[in-house]
Amino acid sequence: MDLVYASGGSYFHSSSVTSGDWIAVVFDVEAVIERILVRTGLPDGSLALRSGFVELSPRLLKMDATIPTVVCADFIRVGEIVGKSTELDDVGKSVWGRPTRCLRLTVGELGDSEGNDVVFHQIAVFTKS
């Protein structure tokens, strides 16, 4: 599930997803994250995640879009993904206000979709201005 939004589409449909797969969002510059909104699935409720979690990291060690590879360090878990839509508020408190370079969303449990498919409809990140 590397570089999922690189195509510029409004959602990402992933096939053969298993527990432990992850999506990394790498910020061009350090960002202070305040709130995160994650929405998965189609409007009818299919192809959604049942659970997962979000982590933030202040350290980008390596990124190579040609392979593709992203390596970040010192992740801190900031919240759990539960159901089709999850909003994580006051994220800055979880990381003591430190800046973030990488966000990682890890798949826990899949919904009732066939073929282990998941649609990631939105990963919205709100930063401190």
Image (spheres, helix red, strand yellow):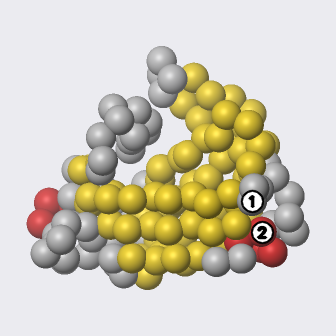
Residue 87: image location, x then y, percent = 52, 76
Q: Nearer the viewer, residue 66 or 129?
A: 129
Residue found farthest to the top: 66
Q: Residue at x 68, y 57 (%)?
A: 127
Q: Residue at x 54, y 31 (%)?
A: 69
Res. 108 image quadrant: bottom left
State whether residue 21 is above or below residue 83.
above
Which quadrant would the C terminus be assigned to in this image? bottom right
Q: Count residues near mark 2 (Cα–Cα under 10 Å), then give few for <14, some for 14-19, many for 20+.
A: some
Q: What is the secondary structure assignment of the residue under circle 1? A: loop
Q: Disc 2 marks which residue?
A: 92
State whether residue 2 is above or below residue 85.
above
Q: Are marks 1 and 2 in contact (CB under 8 Å)?
A: yes
Q: Residue at x 81, y 75 (%)?
A: 93
From the viewer's perspective, is 6 left or right of 11? Answer: right
Q: Count residues near mark 1 (Cα–Cα under 10 Å), then give few for <14, some for 14-19, many for 20+.
A: few
Mark nearer the N terminus (1 vs 2): 2
Res. 33 image quadrant: bottom right
- Examine the rendering and report whether any part of residue 53 can be seen: yes
Q: Disc 1 marks which residue?
A: 128
Residue 116: image location, x then y, percent = 21, 61
Q: Which mark is residue 22?
A: none
Q: Residue at x 65, y 40 (%)?
A: 27
Q: What is the secondary structure assignment of the residue under circle 2? A: helix
Identity of the amino acid at label 2?
Answer: Gly
Q: Nearer the viewer, residue 64 or 128?
A: 128
- Examine the rendering and report whether any part of residue 110 can be seen: no
Which quadrant would the N terminus be assigned to in this image? top left
Residue 90: image location, x then y, percent = 71, 76
Q: CA distance from mark 1 to mark 2?
A: 9 Å
Identity of the amino acid at label 1?
Answer: Lys
